Image (spheres, rainbow, N blue to C red):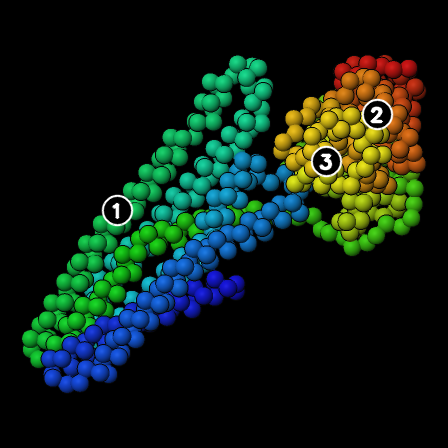
């Protein structure tokens, strides 16, 4: 248990004990004054109860928010690490907008679970302690109090059930709204080009009525519970105080007992007035459910082995990838990329090129078969070992880091020059100290930085997934020549977007409908009219 949580766990019960002791101390003081006795002992007890309760209350007031913040940070960290561990391998991963909503909103709600539950539980114990106090004064007082307990428990149970359902639905709609907004922002250029602003706005905001309905349902539930609880509290207090007054009048109880009965009755019914606290419990429970869904995503197993020395032979052995149920996206497929050679993946859109390339570095997991590097299954490799062995360059590489130097992960002049990135990097006023968020890069410049980062990693197996698709022909030719010189002896798997990439490769793996149709040099495949048709269908100009 962390510091603030421990402080809260101690302060809340201490405050409850002091609060429970206060009515008894007041009763003793009243009886001492009316009886003409010494007030010293009762006065000290009253002062201790007041000061102890005030001090514990102050600590609880500070510790509650801090505890919630502490738990929220821990949950967000755990969720983020788990999502990164799951990676893009799980098709069940929520959409980015939904995931962001869970990380920001649901995690904060779930972070308040301990303070909310502790507060509600302590309020319940305080109420029970107050009932014990009433029973010690007179069993009739406890009996009068219990007349309102049963309907109060039913009221609370109904509120938690209804509020929990409404909170969950509210968060679900909120996440869907965030997901749609994220999609729209990501495709803003296409939306404007198509003149679809109004239609897309309507699609994103289409959920607002449902969000409003859920919000109004929550407010209605709270409003109904508040007035019902208020009425119940008034009836219970009236019944207990009337009974206490009658017994004082009959001489069955001392005058101070009336003050004690009033205090303990207020504490006893206080639990039924904790609608806001109970709403916090329901809110936290809904948040915990949303967080648990993310944490329940299966993460791939992590190996512990290291690669033996070898040329970097990459083998796909009867791999099969499915989307959800029985829908096969790739395979069964077997392919061997000889160590130190370049194999280009060619096929129409949707043939499985990028999916096959993702298997090499466990960016996706096959449902059957295995992938091996130099005879070692990649699933059994240590994560750091796998990242050193397999490097990627993508169509839109992400630059992660506080500065460009961090984002490029050790790329030096040799790598940036080979990727033809040294020219525009030299024009940056702050150079490699420039934060990536401040960069205004073209698609080609971004791809060249991704290639420089790959060259700095210098992995045994290099995977280029449309990594030069945004370069002009002249720059691509220069970069390709420099890459060939810099990566000589390295195994390369290239998702080809131009026929020249296939022509430059040692072998071409021709994919069709997720299967390997042929593996041969580009020049041999060109004699097949279906292959030439595939190049044309994939918008690749044949090269000879």
* Residue farthest left in this picture: 249
Instruction: Specify whether residue 113 is in view.
Output: no
In this rendering, position of residue 310 left or right of residue 297? right
Judge whether 211 appears above or below 282 on screen.
above
Q: Which mark is residue 432?
A: 3
First in residue order: circle 1 vs circle 3: 1
Whole-number angstrom distance, CA of label 1 to CA of label 2: 70 Å
Q: Can the viewer see residue 232?
A: yes
Front position among marks 3 and 2: 3
Q: Position of residue 212 (x, y in %)?
A: 36, 34
At a point 55% along the width and 27% down the height, the residue shown is 185
Along the viewing direction, whichever of 384 and 457 lies nearer the viewer: 457
- Residue under the image location 81 percent in, 40 percent down: 457
Which one is earlier in the sequence, the residue at label 3 or at label 2? 3
Image quadrant occupied by the C terminus: top right
Tag 1's secondary structure? helix
Identify the mark at residue 479; answer none if there is no mark.
2
Spot occupied by residue 460 in the image (x, y as percentages of width and height): 86, 41
Residue visible at 19% across and 54% down in the picture: 231
Q: Residues within 10 Å of mark 1 (few under 14, many from 20)?
A: few
Q: Is residue 232 above or below residue 199?
A: below
Label 2 crowd (10 A; few <14 / some 14-19 / many >=20):
many
CB atoms of marks 1 and 3 within 8 Å: no
Q: CA distance from mark 1 to mark 3?
A: 61 Å
Q: Position of residue 285 (x, y in %)?
A: 44, 52
Whichever of callouts 1 and 2 sits on the residue coming sooner in the sequence is 1
- Left or right: 73 with respect to 248? right
Residue 106: percent from left, percent from top: 48, 46
The residue wearing badge 1 is 224
Q: Nearer the observer, disc 1 or disc 3?
A: 3
Q: Nearer the viewer, residue 85 or 72?
A: 72
């Amino acid at each position: 248990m962390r510091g603030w949580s421990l402080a809260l766990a101690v302060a809340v019960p201490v405050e409850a004990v002091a609060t429970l002791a206060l009515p008894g101390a007041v009763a003793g003081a009243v009886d001492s004054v009316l009886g003409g006795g010494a007030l010293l002992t009762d006065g000290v007890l009253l002062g201790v109860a007041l000061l102890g309760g005030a001090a514990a209350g102050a600590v609880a007031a500070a510790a509650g928010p801090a505890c919630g913040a502490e738990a929220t940070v821990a949950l967000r960290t755990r969720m983020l690490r788990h999502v990164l561990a799951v990676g893009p391998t799980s098709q069940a991963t929520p959409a980015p907008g939904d995931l962001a909503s869970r990380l920001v909103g649901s995690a904060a709600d779930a972070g308040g679970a301990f303070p909310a539950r502790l507060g509600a539980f302590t309020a319940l114990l305080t109420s029970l302690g107050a009932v014990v106090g009433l029973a010690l004064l007179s069993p009739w007082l406890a009996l009068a109090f219990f007349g309102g307990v049963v309907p109060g428990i039913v009221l609370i149970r109904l509120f938690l059930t209804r509020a929990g359902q409404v909170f969950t639905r509210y968060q679900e709609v909120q996440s869907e709204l965030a997901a749609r907004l994220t999609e729209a922002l990501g495709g803003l250029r296409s939306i404007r080009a198509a003149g679809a602003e109004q239609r897309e706005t309507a699609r994103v905001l289409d959920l607002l009525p449902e969000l409003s309905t859920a919000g109004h349902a929550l407010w209605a539930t709270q409003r109904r519970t508040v007035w019902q609880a208020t009425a119940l509290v008034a009836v219970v207090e009236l019944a207990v105080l009337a009974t206490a007054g009658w017994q004082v009048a009959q001489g069955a109880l001392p005058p101070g007992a009336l003050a004690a009965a009033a205090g303990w009755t207020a504490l006893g019914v206080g639990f039924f007035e904790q609608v806001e606290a109970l709403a916090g419990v329901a809110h936290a429970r809904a948040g915990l459910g949303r967080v648990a869904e993310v944490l329940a995503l299966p993460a791939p197993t992590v190996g512990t082995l290291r690669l033996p020395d070898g040329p970097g032979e990459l083998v796909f052995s009867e791999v099969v990838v499915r989307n959800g149920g029985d829908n096969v996206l790739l395979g069964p497929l077997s392919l061997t990329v000889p160590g130190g050679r370049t194999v280009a993946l060619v096929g129409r859109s949707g043939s499985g090129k990028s999916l096959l390339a993702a298997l090499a570095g466990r960016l996706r997991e096959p449902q059957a078969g295995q992938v091996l590097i130099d005879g070692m299954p990649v699933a059994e490799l240590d994560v750091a070992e796998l990242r050193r062995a397999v490097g990627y360059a993508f169509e839109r590489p992400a630059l992660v880091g506080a500065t460009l130097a961090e984002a490029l992960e050790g790329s030096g002049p040799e790598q940036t020059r080979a990727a033809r990135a040294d020219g525009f990097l030299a024009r940056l006023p702050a150079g490699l100290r420039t934060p990536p968020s401040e960069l205004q890069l073209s698609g080609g410049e971004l791809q060249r930085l991704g290639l420089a980062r790959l060259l700095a990693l210098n992995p045994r197996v290099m995977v280029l997934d449309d990594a030069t698709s945004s370069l002009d022909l002249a720059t691509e030719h220069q970069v390709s020549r420099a890459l060939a010189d810099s990566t000589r002896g390295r195994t390369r798997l290239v998702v080809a977007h131009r026929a020249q990439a296939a022509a430059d490769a040692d072998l071409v793996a021709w994919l069709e409908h997720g299967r390997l149709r042929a593996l041969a040099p580009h020049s041999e495949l060109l004699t097949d009219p279906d292959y030439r048709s595939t190049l044309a269908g994939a918008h690749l100009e044949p090269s000879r």
